[in-house]
Image (cartoon, grey):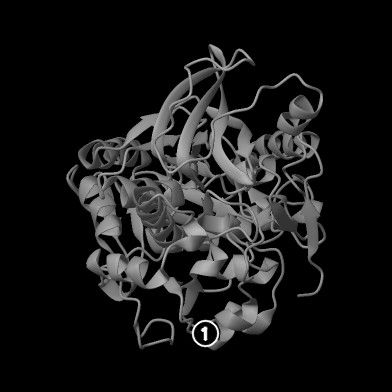
Amino acid sequence: MKDIIMKKQKICRRKFLVNSGLAAAGLAVTNQACTSPRVEKTGRQILDNVDVLVVGAGPAGIGAALGAARTGAKTMLIENHSFLGGVAAWSLGMQINQMRPTGVSRSVVHEHFIQKIQAYGDQAIRFGRHEIWCNVEYMKVAVLDALEESGCRYLLFSRAVDAVVENNRIVGVVIATKRGLKEIRARVVVDCTGDADVAYFAGAETMIDPDDLMPQTLALMLSNLDPGQLPPAEVQKTIAKTIHDSRQKYPLNPAGFIEVEPLANSSSWWVNHAGTADLGCIDVTDPYEFTRVAAFSSRQAIQMIQSIRDSDHPGLQRIELVGTGPQVSVRETRRVKGSYVLTEEDAWSGRVFEDTIGWRSGYLDLGGQKDRLDDGKMMVHDVPYRSIVPEKLDGLLMAGRCISTTHLATAAGKSMGNCMATGHAAGLAAAMSSGKGIMPRELKVKELQDALRADGVDLDVKERVQGKM
């Protein structure tokens, strides 16, 4: 695995406090439910004690929360935004890919999510060959419905800012709230932050490729397109050409790909694009760089709209910008090093693993970063359990784009349906480990596989060629 930098956090705020004598010892590591006093000597309140704590409520976190809660485990999902859904929500209508490859259900968790959106009718959802297109306002409420029906509790406006680690085991997460820093203790934590925040705070080994990071994109929503002047079939081609042809006047316009698609209700249009690719590789775990990206992306959105409205095409001159996402969509940052690092060769060959806990389908998508690797073609390939368990740290699992992969293997599996699948497996494994009073790495994979099969996951998928499953 060339060009991978292993970064192990040497010291974090938690370790500094411990080393300086300002923090008291936390909970003893036992197989019993957490029984610490409600307030630690640090003055931080223990907000809750749960079996499974899922951090990050994007597709991976939703999959993990549903996977765990459906077993009866006391499960909590925390999210720093004011809504659930992650990139599926803040991208304003981006297709949620690989949810039903060739129309086939992936699991009861995927279907639970889909059915809750379907309950709101045609305004909420429409189906493609493998993807679903959602009006995100309906989807946000559908996620609430799914979690509440499963018995999963959730907290919004709660950002993970540190981890509580004892004897090499994560036993809780520190969250920032309007009432200060609070702790949530858990038997098992599932990191679905995308950026591996919890694992990083806990001191787990992480991987990042600073010279190869995929770009970030601020999604746009457009309206007031005149179908009489511009047939829907020509919208994407015409808008993309207009934006590219205007780069001399509007230099922030992206030079790379531009994708324009109707939303579920078909009256507004969602725009995905190459975003910050022209700026080079940016690591948004650096707060200064994340701020720079956010400012650039907002200005870029305005220039894109101005260039469209300046067009000579009568169907574009009255176009309106309805809004942009609440934050830029991030394709890649840190990944957690597991005992197996999934590679692009695994994706190209459609590799099968004995300890599989799911599979990933789609295409190797670098987000417009560069064209390479046989047009992004890959095979349906397994994800081993070893790639969602940290190599050394106990009490933690990861799901979504921060699992143990190389840079290119990250691009091979970041579709939201794939992230939900690894979330489902991680959540189920967390619940089973908690129930047995063991560490996730001690869980018998065969038992997890049996439970996944009972949840409708085909772990023995035979067809490995894309589109023929």
**Which one is in front, 202 or 298?**
202
From the viewer's perspective, is residue 236 above or below residue 181?
below
Q: Residue at x 64, y 66 (%)?
A: 366
Q: Residues within 10 Å of mark 1 (few under 14, many from 20)?
A: some
For the residue labelled by badge 1, is the local secondary structure a helix, a strand or a loop? Answer: loop
Q: Position of residue 337 (x, y in %)?
A: 67, 61
Q: Name the amino acid, label 1.
A: Arg
From the viewer's perspective, is residue 351 above or below residue 239?
below
Q: Residue at x 72, y 50 (%)?
A: 276
Quarter assignment of residue 92: top left
Q: Residue at x 43, y 82 (%)?
A: 466
Q: Residue at x 69, y 74 (%)?
A: 371
Q: Position of residue 182 (x, y in %)?
A: 54, 20
Pointer 1 residue? 351
**Which one is in front, 89 or 71?**
71
From the viewer's perspective, is residue 140 above or below residue 205?
above
